[in-house]
Image (tube, rainbow, N blue to C red):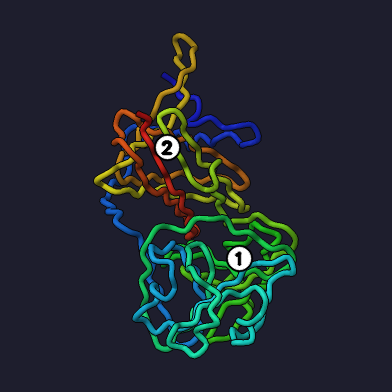
Amino acid sequence: MKIISPFCVPAGFSRWSRRWLAVVFCLTGLACSTARADVVGLSQTLSLTPGWNAVYLEIDPSVTDPAALFAGTPVDIVATFTPASRGQQFVRNPSAAMLSAYGWAVWYAPTRSDGFLSSLYGVYGGKAYLIHARTNASVTVTGSVGVGATAWTPNAYNFVGFALASPGAPTFQQFFRGSPAHNHNQIYRLVNGTWRKVLNPATEAMRAGEAFWIFCRGRSDFQGPLEVSTTLRNALNLTSRAGGQVVFRNRTDHPVSFLLEHITDPARPVPLSTPVKTLDEESGAIRTVSVHFDAGHFQQAFPPLEAGRAIRLPLALRTQEAAPGGLYSLLKVTTDLGTIAYIPVTATRDE
C-alpha cells in the first residue's frame, strides 16, 4: 500500500514536502516520546520584584478574584488595559496618573486607603497585566491555560504578551520578523519601573511571562511565527460523529520546526487518531486509514515547515477507547524558535 500524503490539504494550502512522509511512519511505529505528564492543574510562577512588573499571564486562574488570588502576598496593585477605539494610552511610567487614565481597570488591595477605587474584579489568562509588589515575591498561579488570539488595535501601541519557552525564547526580531506591522523597534519593555525602548530587536530576547508595549502599523492578525488555528476559536471539540483539525501556517521567511505534545489526565486519557489517505497499488483505490496516537501523553516532532507554507492535521476521537462523559486534554505546540501555542481539547463519546 502506497501513501499518497499524510493528510488531506485543502485548496489554497501548499503540498507537503516528501519529508512529511517520515511523520506518518513515525506515527505508525509509535516512535515518539511517552513521558508521563500528570495533569492535575497547570501553573505559572510569577517572579516579582519591588515596584512595577509587566506580566503576561498564561494561566486562567482557578480563583479569579484578585483579593483572593493575591492574598498573603506583597502584591497591592494589579492593572490591565482594555483597548478602545481611541487607541492605546502609552506613557513612560506606570504611575497613579496612568492608572486613572481611560481604559485601565485597576485592583487595589483592601488594606490600601484607595482600595475602594478598585475597578478590576477578575484576573484571567491570556492577558497582560501591570503588577505592583511591595517586596520581592514568587507567586504561583494555578488553573487552566488561558487561550485567545491577540486582537491588535491598528495604528496604536498594544499592551501584549505571548506564551514562550523558558529558557529559549526568541529575540523580538525573530518573533515579529514575519509581520510588517510589528517588524520595527517601536517596542517598550519595563526596566526598573520605567518603559525603555528596545533599541536592537535583533539581539534583545523576549522573556516568558513578560508583557510589553508594541506599536501596530495598520491592521494585523499576527499571532506569532507559527500560526496555530482551529475552526472553533482556538479549541477542538471532538465527538463520535465529528472530528476537528489544527492548521499550522509558517508566517516567517525561513523553515520552522515544531513539536506537538498531548497533555492529559492519566486517569481519563483522550484517545486521538488522524486519518491518512492511502493508495492500493493493485486496485488503484484510495481509502482512509486511521493512524493512532497514544491515548495518554505523547510528543510528536514534525519536520520543518517551509516559509509561507501551511498544513492541516485532522484529528478524531477513537470512540471505542474513550471513557463515557466529557474528556479534556491540551495540545501544546512548541517551535524551534521558542514560541508556544496551546489548544484545549474537549472530547465526548456519544451514547
- Residue plotted at (47% across, 24% down): 277
State which quarter of the image contains the C terminus. top left
Mark 1 or mark 2: whose residue is earlier in sequence: 2
Q: Residue furthest top?
A: 283
Q: Which residue is mark 2?
A: 23
Q: What label sits on residue 270 in the rendered view?
A: none
User: Considering the numbered disc 2 on the image, is that residue within a helix, a strand or a loop?
Assistant: helix
Name which quarter of the figure residue 231 lies in. top right
Q: With respect to residue 326, does 37 lie above or below?
A: below
Left or right of residue 142, residue 13 in this image: right
- Residue 22 seen in this snapshot: no
- Residue plotted at (49% across, 46% down): 235
- Amino acid beneath label 1: Gln
Q: Nearer the viewer, residue 93 or 61?
A: 61
Q: Position of residue 180 (x, y in %)?
A: 70, 59
- Residue 76 seen in this snapshot: yes
Q: Which residue is mark 1?
A: 173
Q: Position of residue 227 (x, y in %)?
A: 56, 50
Name which quarter of the figure residue 28 lies in. top left
- Residue plotted at (61% across, 51% down): 251
Q: Position of residue 12 (x, y in %)?
A: 65, 35
Name which quarter of the figure residue 87 lies in. bottom right
Left or right of residue 117, residue 297 in this image: left
Q: Could you tell me how far apart the alpha carbons at marks 1 and 2 are, in whole angstroms?
A: 30 Å
Left or right of residue 23, residue 128 in this image: right
Q: Nearer the viewer, residue 30 or 120?
A: 120
